[in-house]
Image: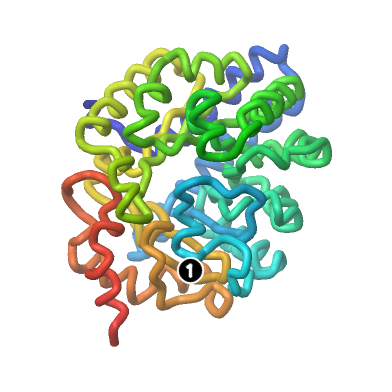
Amino acid sequence: MNTDFNLADYLNKGIENVVRGLVKASFNKPKEIAFVLKYAISSKEAKNRRQSLARRGENVPVFLISSITSSCNLFCKGCYARANQSCGEGVNKKQLSSKRWEEIFNEANELGVSFILLVGGEPLMRREVIEKAAGVKDIIFPIFTNGTMLNDDYLKIFDNSRNLVPIISIEGDKFQTDNRRGEGTYDILMQTMDKLKERGILYGASVTVTTENVGTVTDEVFFEKLYDKGCRALLFVEYVPVIESTKSLAPTDVERKILENKIEELREKYVNSVFVSFPGDEKYSEGCLAAGRGFFHINVDGAAEPCPFSPYSDTNLGEVSLRQALKSPLFKKLNATGMLVGEHDGGCLLFQKENEVKSMLVK
């Protein structure tokens, strides 16, 4: 285990390495050169802004997770968002306006946030918000999409806005992907990846790791196929059980150790690619990064939540600024108790301590 690993530095340097690799491979195309030069400057400026605020006692996380829509065009088995009623038909959540999202993105930029992960639902169902994100050039926006809506119009947007990075969800091989996401999905994803590669668009993939697919998705052969199609980032997210009958799918310490070892091997071999594990990489940050330590989650209705798997809030960004949201009473309590710091048994800490988190909301 690499105890010197720093997630924030790895992401910043990793993105630079990825883009430099693409520049070299694409014979120095002007778009790629301009992007890598601008990103190198903006990431350093963002770090300086965070450090300046830290000296005044204000912690600003490196990244945010933003759910920009509760709508989705797929019905994936075991979907956490649908299970906790934050996504799906008939979900009566008031969505933040695209104007407010634009304000939040700009507020984040001013504070020194470097990455904002756009999730859903299916984020591509809110094109107006994607376009607002495209305009905030100093922030990288990984967009977690099921990949079925990446049509020519969207490909043009991604081609013209290199700070938008599609992260395509895949479950492993064809059988595993179609079994969870619907028949024919895998073939659509392969075609989409070919289109992204053809245009030289930086993109990555996201895998929900379970006891059933851990062997497939940690096999070098799996990433090699994605790599050949132009994929330069792979995010592993441990499956969180939504009902009792799916608990057997949640990774145990055995699977987590396999994942950790394989990721180290991939990082050493593919230096121009990025590999991240959630919540696995949190161990290098001395505990859970939620509740503003390293990130927090903005729900579709503006609620500031510790993380997507801990959907509790006492502060709403429809009413306060991003800077104020970081001072959420719930976040303060979670940090003050020491709950987030130190080792735990693995998996999502706040999901495991759901009752304790809820008790902190009681006045």
Give percent across and percent down for residue 179: 52, 35
Between residue 104 and residue 120, name the one nearer to us: 120
In which quadrant of the rendered image does the N terminus lie?
top left
Please name the colour scheme applied to the rendered image: rainbow
Between residue 198 and residue 207, name the one nearer to us: 207
Residue occupying image coordinates x 20% and y 61%: 339
Q: Is mark 1 on a helix, strand or loop?
A: helix
Residue occupying image coordinates x 64% and y 36%: 38
Q: Is residue 169 visible?
A: yes
Locate residue 155: give its quadrant: top right
Residue occupying image coordinates x 75% and y 28%: 31
Query: For mark 1, what is the residue?
Result: 323
Relative to 298, does residue 203 appear above or below in the rendering?
above
Is residue 77 shown left or right of residue 143?
left
**Disc 1 marks which amino acid?**
Arg
Residue occupying image coordinates x 50% and y 41%: 44
Is residue 242 shown left or right of residue 224?
left
In which quadrant of the rendered image does the C terminus lie?
bottom left
